[in-house]
């Protein structure tokens, strides 16, 4: 009921400081969740036969330290019981000595592939086995708030590299869009200790997404809308590096 993998970071997963990039952490979580779901009998292939698939609703990542290329990262993930049609899944990241680098909590739902609406798990006969004793007790992802104060607006159109097998913007790409809004000098001086994301509406090819970005002290926020409909929101906390 608990999945663990060891990961050697490659250079293309690192930023200009040689640290694991946030978007690649989100990709790693996505891939580990997919592998574990397959082993639990609720993976991509099994759900596709029922005309449904997993969609990520909300994520909260907390990092105490971003590992570098010399660190072997142990990724551990496990699901917990369904809560009102939502499936919690948690993660923890450790270095080679077992020291905790960070944790993440996520909420997933089931979507009808044809009409793009959420489905009741019981109606499709979907249950997920969960461990009786999880490795850590973590909180569910919290509320993500809209940008406020002075807001910088821009627009973006999904490109080839943004899209995944479902022909929509992959959840990790929103992290790229967000981190690109933060000045490089701040990335050089510190790191994002917490990143929370809510996903409201998928963004497909051909979309024009209006972005709204704001900063309030060490808090950063980004929202993306299409035709005035909210698609996603990101909140993050910046922390100065202690040398």
Image: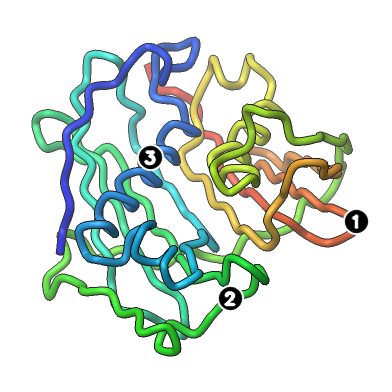
Instruction: Estimate how packed mark 2 is, as few (under 14), some (14 to 19) or many (20 or more) residues with alpha carbons within 10 Å.
Output: some
Q: Are marks 2 and 3 in contact (CB under 8 Å)?
A: no
Q: Nearer the viewer, residue 90 or 66?
A: 90
Q: Residue at x 18, y 25 (%)?
A: 72
Q: Secondary structure at mark 1?
A: loop
Q: Residue at x 54, y 15 (%)?
A: 188
Q: Which residue is mark 1?
A: 227
Q: Which mark is residue 118?
A: 2
Indicate the position of residue 217 as horizontal and vertical percent values: 68, 39
Disc 2/disc 1 C-alpha distance (Å): 21 Å
The quarter of the picture where residue 65 lies is top left
Q: Where 122 sits versus 96, above or below?
A: below
Q: Nearer the viewer, residue 117 or 223?
A: 117
Indicate the position of residue 16 as horizontal and vertical percent values: 49, 10
**Which image quarter holds the C terminus?**
top left
Q: Residue furthest left?
A: 97
Q: Residue at x 17, y 40 (%)?
A: 5
First-in-chain label (2 vs 1): 2
Instruction: Estimate how packed mark 3 is, as few (under 14), some (14 to 19) or many (20 or more) residues with alpha carbons within 10 Å.
Output: some
- Which is closer to the viewer, label 2 or label 1? 2
Q: Residue at x 30, y 79 (%)?
A: 127
Disc 2/disc 3 C-alpha distance (Å): 31 Å
- Which is closer to the viewer, label 2 or label 3? 2
Q: Residue furthest bottom?
A: 123
Q: Where 61 sits versus 18, above or below?
A: below
Q: Which residue is mark 3?
A: 63
Q: Secondary structure at mark 3?
A: strand
Q: Where 144 sits versus 242, above or below?
A: below
Indicate the position of residue 193 as horizontal and vertical percent values: 46, 39
First-in-chain label (1 vs 3): 3
Indicate the position of residue 140 as horizontal and vertical percent values: 41, 67
């Amino acid at each position: 009921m608990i999945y663990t993998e060891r990961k050697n970071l490659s250079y293309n997963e690192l930023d200009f400081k040689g640290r694991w990039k946030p978007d690649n952490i989100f990709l790693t979580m996505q891939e580990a969740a997919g592998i574990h779901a397959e082993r639990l009998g609720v993976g991509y292939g099994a759900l596709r036969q029922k005309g449904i698939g997993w969609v990520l609703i909300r994520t909260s990542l907390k990092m105490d330290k971003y590992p570098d290329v010399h660190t072997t990262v142990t990724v551990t993930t496990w699901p917990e019981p369904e809560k009102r049609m939502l499936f919690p899944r948690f993660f923890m990241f450790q270095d080679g000595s077992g020291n905790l680098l960070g944790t993440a909590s996520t909420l997933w739902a089931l979507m009808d592939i044809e009409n793009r609406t959420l489905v009741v798990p019981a109606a499709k006969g979907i249950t997920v086995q969960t461990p009786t004793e999880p490795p850590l007790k973590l909180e569910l992802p919290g509320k993500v708030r809209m940008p406020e104060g002075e807001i910088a607006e821009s627009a973006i159109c999904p490109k080839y590299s943004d899209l995944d097998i479902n022909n929509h913007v992959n959840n990790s790409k929103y992290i790229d869009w967000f981190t690109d809004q933060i000045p490089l000098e701040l990335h050089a001086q510190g790191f994002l200790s917490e990143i929370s994301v809510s996903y409201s509406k998928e963004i497909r090819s051909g979309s024009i997404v209006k972005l709204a970005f704001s900063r309030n002290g060490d808090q950063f926020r980004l929202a993306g809308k299409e035709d005035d409909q909210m698609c996603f929101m990101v909140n993050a906390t910046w922390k100065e590096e202690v040398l």
